[in-house]
Structures are given as C-alpha cells and as structure tokens.
Amino acid sequence: MKEQHMSVDINSYIADLTCPVTVKEGKPVVALSFKSLHAGTMTAIKFAVKGYNSFGEIVPVNGEEQFLITVQDISVPQNGMIRNLQVPLPQDDIRKIELMEHQYSFADGTTAMYEGEKWVDYDVELFDTQDAEEKEQLDALKTINAQATAKPAELDGAWVCLCGHYNTDENNVCNRCEMTKETAFETVQEPALGALMESYKEKKAHAAEADKKKKKLLMLLSIPAALVLALIIALVSNAAVLSQRKTFDSAADMQKALQGRWTAVTEDGKTASGRIVISENKLESTAGSTSAKASDSAAPSSDDSSAKETAKTTDNAAKDTKEITWKPSRGVFKADGKKYIVEKNGRIKDSSGKEYKKAVTSSKSGSSSSGSKSSSSKSGSSSSGSSILKISNTKVTSNSSYTICTGTLTNNGKSTYKFVQVKGAFQNSSGKVVDTDSTYAVGAEGLAPGESTTFRLSIKKNASATKCNVTIFSFK
C-alpha cells in the first residue's frame, strides 16, 4: 500500500470550485464550476464574494468589501457538476474574485448555512498498482465500485471510504461514491474479499477460455470464409487492444477526466524528463526537464521580459500548444497528429512510448485560507529568489497531527504566471532541515500582475520544526 496525505474542508457542500473572471462587452463575468457533495439535489447556492481590480485592490460594492452572488434555478444531484455557469459581477473594474460558500437550498425545501472552513488533515492508504497482487485486488474491487482506490479506514470521528473520500461518522453513506460504510469495510475483509477475488479470477479464466475457443474456431474456418475470418480477427484484436485502455462514454467525459498536469515517468514510476498540460480542449507539451534545481535557478528577475526568457531556458525545450481531437470509445486523443493512449492504469502513453502520470496537489480552489486550528505558533522564514514572484507572511503552526506553514505569494511583475509550485523546507532552531513539502500555490487559472494568493504546506507534526524556508520550485 502507498500512504498519501490528504486535506479536506468537512463543512463544505461542494468541491472542485473554479471561478475565472472574463470581460464580455465591457462587463466582468465569472464562470462558475463546482461539484455538489450533498446527498440531496441542490437547487440554489449563495457565495460570499470579494472582488479585486487588476492591481489586487479590493473593489467595494455599495460601500462594502464583500457582496453576495446567488445562483438559482439549478438542479445538481450528489456528485453532479455545474460547468461554466455565467454570472455577471456588480462592478465593472472587478478582474478577480475570492469565493466562500454562504448558503444552500435543496429540492426537498430545506436550506443550510455554510459553517465556515474546518480543514481536516488525514492519511490514506492507496492500492499500489505497481504491485501485481495489489493491482489484481484493486481490479477486482473496481467491479463493485468503479472509484475504488484506497483501503477503508476508521479515523477519529470519521471514516475513509473505498474511494478514498473522507466522511464524518454522521454519514453512513459516502458523499462521493454512495457506497455504505458497512459495505466498504466488509468488501476488503475476509471472507468477502476472498470470495470476490475467487469470482474475479473465475471470470478472467472464463474470458481466457472463451478467447481460446474463438481462436480455435478461427483455425477451423475454411478458405472460402477468409473474409469472415478476417472480420473475426479484427474484432478479437480490437477487443484485446481496448482491454488495455481506459475508454469513455463521450468526448466531454474524457475531457473532464484528463484535465490537468501530467508528468513523464519511467517504468518503475520515477519522474522522467517532460510533461504535458491538458486545459479544456488544448494540450501543451514540454520536452525538457523541470527539476527542482533548475526551477530554483529560473525564478523570474525584476525585469519581466528576462524572467520569461529565463523560464524558457529552465524548461530546456520549447512549449507547444495544440488543439485536441478526442476519441473516447477508443481511449485515444490526438494533438497535431500525435496519438496519446489512456491506459487501464490511468496513465497516458504517447506515440513514442513515453508514459505520463497525473500530478497530484493538495491545494483547494475557490478558497484562500487554511482554516487549520493551531495549538502553537512560531515565526517562519521564506525566500522566493525573485522580486517578481514574492513570498511573504510565512507562518509555522502546529495542530494535534500536523505542522503547517502558510504564506502569501504576490506577483510584482508585468506578466501572468501559471502553475507556480512552492517548496517548503521545515527547519529546527539550528537551521537543520527536518522535513519538506511542496504544493501548487497557483494552477491553470494563473496569477496576474498585482495579484496575491495564499498557500499551505504541511508535514506530520514535528515539535522541533520552528521555521520554514519557502522557495519557488517551478512556474510557467
């Protein structure tokens, strides 16, 4: 099993919130996208909003720093998604907003208020797909829960589902995959797991035997049946190819599943040179290396134009953006004639045989504060290596389980930067590094000139960590 650290706001009714602002005919409009986690059907939601101009200054509305956005006449079931819902903003000079959930309404007539951020850090054990035995167990578990990925676990006042989602003890049904707690835990224990594995292996054996019979039948076909033989071979071959791929019901489903940053990996799962970024219907590829050492030396200088040139040099290769053509039923997409295959294990393989693994981050869109409760507080140190992208207000705190560093990243330059990754070196009072963590302070939405955003780094609680040196790890 592979252990992975996770963070979740247990008071939130939604997930995957994005809120980019664009200007249409001189008027600012926000495109809202989010997923509902509530068991009922959401029909309306209010957000508390702060608006900022291009210089990062708050834009008051009716003399107040905060105003409300109301989204009505929607029907979003549990795990349903709202995409690019266009909402006009009340002041013409707003160019960026911060959203916080405020109130919800549901189809059964009930309403609920957002009780404020309540972040919980927890560790989850994931099935290791590089281990043959664990991969076979996971494949078998996916026959009863397609989102299976983790070993269910009991936490303090909560539980982790087979899909890896954090649920409080008040919820006996997972908010993400809708599997009951009882079923999730029984499935991975004996005798249920043994019975499931036996059934899975029998089905595989029957499939193999059926395939063997098909091949024997082909050998018995006569020469006049050559065309029929060719057709059967083609169908069998096609089925074999598709059995090694992950296919999708529609182009929209495929596009949604593959959004984000993908890093090249070797056969044993180690990071290799190169990456691709899929944003909406575009693919950006970079052939060069983006190691931490190179990225640190490539932080932007006070001259914005030289910053861009330095960033290009750091990547060691030109970035190339192309339109994507989706073929969901084949588990394939193409960009500028190059074919990419979505493998059964969730990785992407290009036509040269290079594999890419999706990058995982701990950042949460739509919110700018950590919400962690602290039992102690100590000052932190930081450096960005640049006066363009500046790190400030770093602070090291601890709760019952984790030591946490929060800070602010500000763009003092003239260009927008995307995918800004920061790295924190937690140090003791003597300056010795005791642990490290990294996260994306900025994603695909970008950080415009004059804008600021917050970030959050965490390690398992370490009383000796009194400060954190934060540096820029990579950016675009």
Image (tube, rainbow, N blue to C red):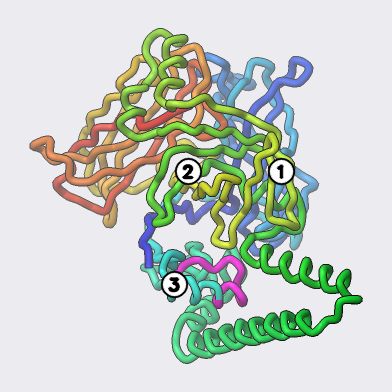
Residue 151, quarter of the rendered image: bottom left
Name the kind of residue labelled 2 in the image.
Answer: Thr
Q: Is residue 46 left or right of residue 355?
A: right
Q: Is residue 357 visible?
A: yes
Residue 228 image point, x, y percent:
87, 73
Is 56 placed above or below 292 here?
above
- Mark 1 or mark 2: which is in front? 2
Dividing the image into 4 quarters, which one contains the N terminus? Answer: bottom left
Is 118 placed above or below 235 here?
above
Identify the residue under disc 2: 263
Task: Residue at the far front: name it.
Answer: 223
Q: Which mark is residue 132?
A: 3
The residue located at (72%, 59%) in the rendering is 77
- Label 2: few (<14), some or many (≥20) within 10 Å? many
Identify the residue under disc 1: 83
Residue 18, quarter of the rendered image: top right
Task: Please report contact status of discs 1 and 3: CB closer than 8 Å, yes or no.
Answer: no
Name the kind of residue labelled 3 in the image.
Answer: Ala
Residue 189 image point, x, y percent:
45, 84
Seen from the viewer's position, the closer of residues 355 and 73 is: 355
Q: Is residue 343 left or right of residue 288?
A: right
- SS type, badge 2: strand
Task: Please report contact status of discs 1 and 2: CB closer than 8 Å, yes or no.
Answer: no
Q: Give the mark nearer the N terminus: 3 vs 2.
A: 3
Seen from the viewer's position, the closer of residues 298 and 153 is: 298
> Could you tell me what secondary structure mostly forms the magenta stretch?
loop
Q: Is residue 106 visible?
A: no
- SS type, badge 1: strand
Task: Please report contact status of discs 3 and 2: CB closer than 8 Å, yes or no.
Answer: no
- SS type, badge 3: helix
What stretch of residues is rendered in magenta? 140-152
Q: Give the mark nearer the N terminus: 1 vs 2.
A: 1
